[in-house]
Amino acid sequence: MNCNSVKSLKLKNQSLHGTSPVTTFGPKACMLQNPHAVMHIQDPASQRLTWNKPPKSVLVIKKIQDASLLQPFKELCVFLTEKNMIVYVERKVLADPVIQADESFAAVIQKFCTFREDLDDISNRVDFIICLGGDGTLLYASSLFQKSVPPVMSFHLGSLGFLTPFNFDTYQSQVTQIIEGNAAIILRSRLRVVKESREKNARVDKKGIIMTKGDSEGSRKAMQYQVLNEVVVDRGPFSYLSNVDLFLDGHLITTVQGDGVIVSTPTGSTAYAVAAGASMIHPNVPAIMITPICPHSLSFRPIVVPAGVELKIMLSRDSRNTAWVSFDGRKRQEICHGDNITITTSCFPVPSICFQDPVNDWFESLAQCLHWNVRKKQNYLSSKEDVF
């Protein structure tokens, strides 16, 4: 091996995933390649934002009913329109009485393109997204795009700010840098969730309801969701433990008896899952985390399974009551006998723009938001002091 090869290998080993695994074993054995594989593990340092054409449109997501965001929202929108950007804003944001009463902002409002959640499709109109608020604004932006998601730039103007690395004080230079295509991105994987339920007199509408022929109890309805943080199944308002069966690739792996179960992405590992005792996983790790909520078992620990497996959750036959499910804390609904929830890794991640890079941003969030490994420093021991 020459010097250049050694140097290249050393540089590659600095990446989060190391060198690519060898897929040949001995003179004749090899790993069968799967042409349908949808996941490719990249070196995080190589994930950079690139524009095929200069961006022309931007979606601005603002936290609703937060008066402290009105001035930053106005400043940003004026700045974007001065750069000849087409600005998309949700219609309910402009319904704020304070914005409506601001005469100096009226000329800018006339230039906006508006839309309504669940009614207007903007998936092919927006080049990138800017979020003003907390982590919830990024989750909300993700929910607006059920397929490909434009790059998302998130400003920390909320409470926690784990997923919002940018400070608004220098927004002009930062936004200009993004428009010029000079930034690192982190690909936050999402979960593709399909909830199938029995429903009498179900019908087809324009919101994604898929109808199939069912049994005598009625037709079946299927709803699909793209989830950035987690799917939570819990016992709801009932006093009894929830009893749900958990399948992995068609095989029953366990029955969850407790308050419920969390199925999360690596991004969601630092949300509800970590509060329930799970480990924290970097978003670049291709995985799905399964975390029980207050299990009635001393040995039921959180586990991590490979991204791409298919999980299915069903209410156990002998369950005393129904269960409830929510998707990123929204769309909460009941799970009855005969219903099932299928979860797998989505092929549509959220490209989140980094302040520095995928690794440094994550550890900075751990330190600043969760105070990870914060404790009083141990005093220095001089050589003259007694060791005991």
Image (tube, grey):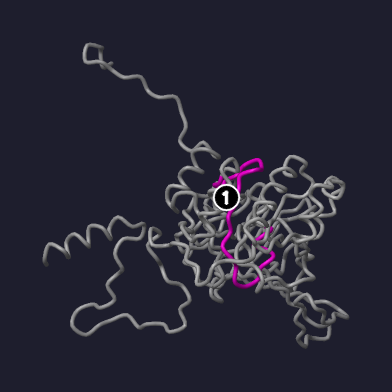
Under mark 1, the amino acid is: Leu
For the point 62% across and 50% down, the residue is 272
* Residue 252 seen in this snapshot: no
For the point 83% across and 77% down, the residue is 199
Q: Is residue 226 magenta?
A: no
For the point 54% across and 53% down, the residue is 269
Q: Looking at the picture, tell me which residue is in the foreground, 185 or 194.
A: 185
Q: Which residue is mark 1?
A: 163
Position of residue 58 measured from the top left corner of the image (x, y, whole percent): 64, 62
- Above or below 320: residue 99: above
Q: Is residue 185 left or right of residue 45?
A: right
For the point 77% across and 66% down, the residue is 115
Q: Which span of residues is magenta-colored?
A: 140-166
Q: Main secondary structure of the magenta part?
A: loop
Q: Quadrant of residue 380?
A: top left
Q: Secondary structure at mark 1?
A: loop
- Above or below 207: residue 211: below
Quadrant where the image shows the N terminus: bottom left
Quadrant where the image shows the C terminus: top left
Q: Local crowd at mark 1 within 10 Å, few (<14), some, or many (≥20)?
A: many
* Residue reaching furthest to the bottom: 213
Q: Quadrant of residue 57?
A: bottom right
* Residue 290 seen in this snapshot: yes
Q: Looking at the picture, tell me which residue is in the foreground, 154 or 84.
A: 84
Position of residue 169 measured from the top left corner of the image (x, y, whole percent): 59, 40
